[in-house]
Amino acid sequence: MKRFTAVLLSVFFAFAAAPRAAESYTNAYDAITLFTKVLEEVHRSYVDTNEAGYDSLVRHAMTGMLQDLDPYSQFLDKESYKDMKDDTEGHFSGVGLVVSMKDGMLTVVSPMEDTPAFRAGLLSGDVLVEINGEETRDMSLSDAVKKMRGEAGTSIKLKSIRPATHEAKESTIVRAEIEVASVKDAKLLDDGVGYIRITQFNEPTAADLKEALKKLTDQKMKTLVLDLRGNPGGLLTAAAGVAELFLPHGNLIVFTKGRDGKKSDQRFTSSGKTHYTDFPMVILINGGSASASEIVSGALQDQKRAVLVGEKTFGKGCVQSILPLEDGAAVKLTTALYYTPSERVIQDHGIEPDVKVEMDPEDLFKLRLKQAQKDGEVDKDLPIEPEIRDVQLDYAIGTLKGMMIQQEWMK
């Protein structure tokens, strides 16, 4: 990509007789005329003929054009498009990291649970500085994701820095086939407090959550903690499906705004027949809660349905539209922003909790790892500090008990 950009610049300067190169074009025809001249010159003169085919040059150009717009817009070749569709179905091969660009750095949104990256100890907020010895400073988000994907059983070396401690860490991780259960640990705690954790939002999430809620209500659940900590998001439809389970019919969940106003605006409201609206509820969030997690949290906070406990969320709230192409590739383009029902912007702002309770990300990781040991998902002989308290969950339970007392008092 760097070579192609350098060649483009050289050829642009070569067209000194074409002063319109520096002007703002008002129609596509004039702009594409100059592009075609550059394309022909590169095709005819570039030293490496393998890199100068029309197909290769056009794809490089589309990749560069889209990645310069924002970290999320990108050109997806056939393989990348297939990988993206596999993600939404909850299975793929790789290390299990959800990453994004934040302040120009390749940043871990969250490691997916029960994956190689999770077991390697990578945490939300870690900055990936090298992939297989290659610096990520000038690497696009799509290139980074592609490098981390690969066949199960192959290994990859990642170098990361933890901003909170400035600790550098090198990890050799073996890729695996990843099957992610999105709804986990549905159980009844003391005093009728229900607990459900959602690890990501994919196609089965809303249906699986509905089933878990039915089991807990059958066990006389009185209140609920919905844990979205470390949940990097996923499908908008899954987020809407989860939120509507807790809201009355017709309540607004989220809406979008694009640059052309009403034409691109979408509104998602609560529909369906099953709505759990009659018990107090707390949602746990932190810096690893992103995208769909922020949509659910923001909706239930704005609609006064749940109290948010924890830390400010990641702040990823832009809409990517997928435009399939004839050859099996696709364009992923940012076309709008998400807004909560009270018109708060999620992108770059995140969702603030009602009650701020800080927790060391490493402590949460150790608690998750300990639970995975109990479930037989990781080595049971792996030493883990035993006496770590989940202070955010403790506070959530205390909040719910207080809400129950108030509810009884008001009867």
Image (tube, rainbow, N blue to C red):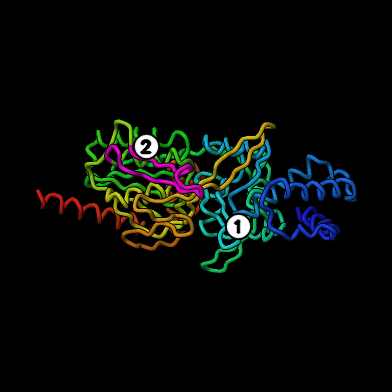
Q: Nearer the viewer, residue 122 or 254?
A: 254
Residue at image point 22% right, 38% down: 220
Note whether residue 46 is visible: yes
What amino acid is found at the position of numbered circle 2 in the picture? Leu
Note whether residue 385 is visible: no
Q: Secondary structure at mark 1?
A: strand
Task: Determine the image quadrant of residue 269.
Answer: top left
Magenta stretch in the rendered image: 248-270
Picture coordinates of residue 407 (x, y %)? 15, 50
Determine whether 188 is above or below 99 in the image.
Answer: above
Picture coordinates of residue 408 (x, y %)? 12, 49
Q: How many marks?
A: 2
Say which mark, if any, is on residue 314.
Answer: none
At label 1, counting other C-alpha atoms closer than 10 Å, the crowd grade (few under 14, some 14-19, many 20 or more) is many
Task: Determine the image quadrant of residue 244.
Answer: top left
Say which mark, if any, is on residue 106.
Answer: 1
Q: Secondary structure at mark 2?
A: helix
Magenta stretch mostly in which secondary structure? strand
Horizontal arrangement in the rendering, residue 28 relative to residue 384 (left or right): right
Q: Which residue is mark 2?
A: 209
Labelled pair 2, 1 in contact (Cβ < 8 Å): no
Residue 255 covered by magenta stretch: yes
Horizontal arrangement in the rendering, residue 182 relative to residue 303 (left or right): right
- Upstream in the sequence, badge 2 or badge 1? 1
Horizontal arrangement in the rendering, residue 53 relative to residue 264 (left or right): right
At label 2, counting other C-alpha atoms closer than 10 Å, the crowd grade (few under 14, some 14-19, many 20 or more) is many
What amino acid is found at the position of numbered circle 1 in the picture? Leu
Picture coordinates of residue 367 (x, y %)? 42, 53
Residue at image point 57% right, 35% down: 86
